[in-house]
Image: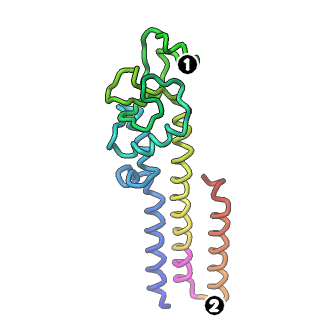
Amino acid sequence: MPQPAVTAIGLGLDILGASLIAIPDARTLFSQLPAGALKEARDRMALIGTRQGDTGFEALQAILNEIDPVAEFGTNNGGEEYVEIVVNSLSGTQSEEAFQHPDFSWGNRYVEARYQESGASDETDFYDVEGVFDAISARERPQTAQLRLYGLLILLCGFSFQLLATIEADTIFSISVAFLTLVAGILVYMYRDRLE
């Protein structure tokens, strides 16, 4: 294969790899992916609240359905039909119903999953903020790290193609460079959990 073609392939792989590495930093583009949509929902939940139809709402609701709430008030306990999720701090008096939930205290910060938009607390499930954010991170971070890892592997292949195009050497040297690139790629992939 002629050197200009090999160089072009290498540059193309470099562009693709660098793009994959940069996607998590491009908020609008990243929110189109599952991990980005979940991160968008988390940020929105913490700032102004997220509602049905917002990016990542369904993924966030699915995470809440896997976690036990600190307290469930109202008739809809179960969480399948949330319409709004927000991080909030409540103040008020302890109701008789609140005494049934010893881990719940008015005035503390909770993730509120509401059955009615801007609803009253009697139609809300309350979740531990730290537990929810940890569950979101446990799902979002590995996907982001995997995307960047694949970008790194493609970038590595692109550099190898460029190296092969610029070095006028015999076949043995070219095969050695290709083999070392393959081994490096396999090692990076095998130890990807440590790179996350």
Residue at left offset 54%, top offset 47%: 139
Residue at left offset 67%, top offset 88%: 172
Residue receiving disc 2 = 171
- Which x, y percent locates residue 103? 57, 20
The vertical placement of 142 against 90, above or below, is below
Left-right relation of 169 to 90 = right
Between 80 and 34, the residue placed more toward the observer is: 80
Disc 2 crowd, CA 10 A, few/some/many (<14, 14-19, 20+): few
Between 117 and 20, the residue placed more toward the observer is: 117
- Which x, y percent locates residue 196? 60, 52
Residue 60 appears in which quarter of the rendering?
Answer: top left
Q: Nearer the viewer, mark 2 or mark 1?
A: 1
Q: Which mark is residue 101?
A: 1
Disc 1 crowd, CA 10 A, few/some/many (<14, 14-19, 20+): few
Residue at left offset 37%, top offset 30%: 115
**Span highlighted in magenta in the image:** 160-168
